[in-house]
């Protein structure tokens, strides 16, 4: 009998920069040239079938032109592609084209692309660097900070994946012009979530400027892009590995994710989160943390952003209720929700007892009226 | 245009303990009770169809008896199971049985089990803790230190995976008694590699005690188990993420892995590595780093351990040569080998220029005579 201690304590630096602006391809190429990812000269550009035509091909050609090696790996657009099969197909295609560990992945697209490409980067040759070039508001709001990458499985959303930080994130606001209106709204759901969760002033800003935002006013877009980063960053900084505090980012997501899956992805992620936010304001009011007026303001703001605030008729509420129990947040079979406190802050909880435990009856009651 | 800096510098402690002994199930249960993995009470025991009957079922029952929740997840024994499909099936089975992030994976088995289970743990719910209960010499020699986890793909061995450190490793020497002789030999290939690479005294010990080892003499097994940990640990400590120095652990593996795949896994990992070690001693002699006598001693030691020292006839050497070029170590399309210097040390190389570049002609010449 003998024991042996493997000491693996060390300092890890996963810091990175988020750059927001208009048309950032040249900035990206300049960064690659000045060694953003060291000496790497080979880039796997991962994108979806929509973004391919809009932006990724141009970026790919520019990178080739700059003297690097590059290939485009394209998968069909949509949340349904965020599965292990797509990951496998892209890995095989990369291996086929002789990609090994001396490469870098560039994700060009929205949240599905950045989630999937970040996950691929995390396990390709046991980890290669990756860069996010975000082309949607949702990716800017949600996927650019936090390092969460994942795929969906038949039984659960985002349950297979890892924490993986990009080398840099580019938020190209110019690309939002080509976003379908419902995609813009979907991104705004995460933006509104951030305001509800952490910033009452920003909430008021959104109430006042929602029309400007929907009209793609430059100043308004700049402002929300920065605010999204800032708010999410503050939370992630304190809790990179989601041990407790970071749970607050799941505001609206417990119900939202279940709705998204139950709708069979007919609802976009942000649309489902919007309904989830309404559900959690109802719970918050029930518990005495919000008043009727505050609940109403959240609902009105979501409506201004052209987001749904009630469960579509085609969703079976019994199925939805059961789906809730497959959430990552379920511990010991108990459902927990994080809820907001008024507008711009969260009900506090400690690390070991995050969120508020909700009985199946209470959950059903909230869902039933939604 | 604005930039935002995400600061993610922090101290990470992945330290863990390796415990070597005879019949360690009680030790494991005691450790789980005293909080080795915190408050976790739910254990997914991953094993293969051979180890299931020999050891895993007994461990599973003991863990249940101790008042924990547990399930056995069994896949067909053999290297061919170390693929993404098996990973997916186990993930789905775990989700089906309501495993979420509040669980711990216990790998019970050899290198295939620990590689696969460690990879599953790394991406399940974005990472759950795992424990290795190693039941083969190969797992003790190779998989217990280093944190490398991976699966094979049709085009390459170990190319999809991640670095993931276990919470503890148990090396149960009692289990080696049931090891088929060729599996014991396979493990000895890695042991001999460690001696060649870093410890001339240990090399001499092996020359003197190979018979004792093959007869499972307790003292000899204890000694090699400790030496394996010690040597590998020294290397891994200096270079956890394989940025350079750790490459020396690939002694014999560049050719070995290619032989293993080309044999369609008819050769065990260690058997293929044995032939790879011979190949790299030939290269070393050619370059003037070893003399004829040293090359002969390595070959004789491998033979004493009942390991093959030449390429089986059924392997097409042209196919093998091409296979070499799919290795993770290929950079810019150039083949690189790490080679030993005499007995017990390595030819030094710097971080940016690891290994020795070998032309296709030279590689073929070495393979042709093997």
Image: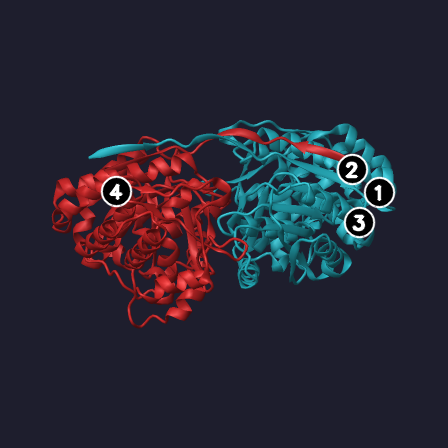
Chain colours: A red, B cyan
B246 with respect to A140 (left or right)? right
Could you tell which of marks 3 and 1 lies nearer the N-terminus?
3
Quarter occupied by residue A269 = bottom left
Whether tag 4 and tag 1 are in contact, CB under 8 A, the answer is no
A40 with respect to A295 (left or right)? right
B366 w.r.t. A2: above or below: below
Quarter occupied by residue A82 = bottom left
Q: Position of residue B265 (x, y in %)?
A: 65, 57
What secondary structure is marked by label 4?
Answer: strand
Tell me if mark 4 has few (under 14), some (14-19) or many (20+) residues whose alpha carbon lies within 10 angstroms of its own: many
Q: Which residue is mark 4?
A: A171
Q: Which mark is residue A252?
A: none
Q: Which residue is mark 3?
A: B176
Q: Which residue is mark 1?
A: B213
Could you tell me how far apart the alpha carbons at marks 2 and 1 are, in whole angstroms?
Answer: 9 Å
Quarter occupied by residue B195 = top right
């Amino acid at each position: 009998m003998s024991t042996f201690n493997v000491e693996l304590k060390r300092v890890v630096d996963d810091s990175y920069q988020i750059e927001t602006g208009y048309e950032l391809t040249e900035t990206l190429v300049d960064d690659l040239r000045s060694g953003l990812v060291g000496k790497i000269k080979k880039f796997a550009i991962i994108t979806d079938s929509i973004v391919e035509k809009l932006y990724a091909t141009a970026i790919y050609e520019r990178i080739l032109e700059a003297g690097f090696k590059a290939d485009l790996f394209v998968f069909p657009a949509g949340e349904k592609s965020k599965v292990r099969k797509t990951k496998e197909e892209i890995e095989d295609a990369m291996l086929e084209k002789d990609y090994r560990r001396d490469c870098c992945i560039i994700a060009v697209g929205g949240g599905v692309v950045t989630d999937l490409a970040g996950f691929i980067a995390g396990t390709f040759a046991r980890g290669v660097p990756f860069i996010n070039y975000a082309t949607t508001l949702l990716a800017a709001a949600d996927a650019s900070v936090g390092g969460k990458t994942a795929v969906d499985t038949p039984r659960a959303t985002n349950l297979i994946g890892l924490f993986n930080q990009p080398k840099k994130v580019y938020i190209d606001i110019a690309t939002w012009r080509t976003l379908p209106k419902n995609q813009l709204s979907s991104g705004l759901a995460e933006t509104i979530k951030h305001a509800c969760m952490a910033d009452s002033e920003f909430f008021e800003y959104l109430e006042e400027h929602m029309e400007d935002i929907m009209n793609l006013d430059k100043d308004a877009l700049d402002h929300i892009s920065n605010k999204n980063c800032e708010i999410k960053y503050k939370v992630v900084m304190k809790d990179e590995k989601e041990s407790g505090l970071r749970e607050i980012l799941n505001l609206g997501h417990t119900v939202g994710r279940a709705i998204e899956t139950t709708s069979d992805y007919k609802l976009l992620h942000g649309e489902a989160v919007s309904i989830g936010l309404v559900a959690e304001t109802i719970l918050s009011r029930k518990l005495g943390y919000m008043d009727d007026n505050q609940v109403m303001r959240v609902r009105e703001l979501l409506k201004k952003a052209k987001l749904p605030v009630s469960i579509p008729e085609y969703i079976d509420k019994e199925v939805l209720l059961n789906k809730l129990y497959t959430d990552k947040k379920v511990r010991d079979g108990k459902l927990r929700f994080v809820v907001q406190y008024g507008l711009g802050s969260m009900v506090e909880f400690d690390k070991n007892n995050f969120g508020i435990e909700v009985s199946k009856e209470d959950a059903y009651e909230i869902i039933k009226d939604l």
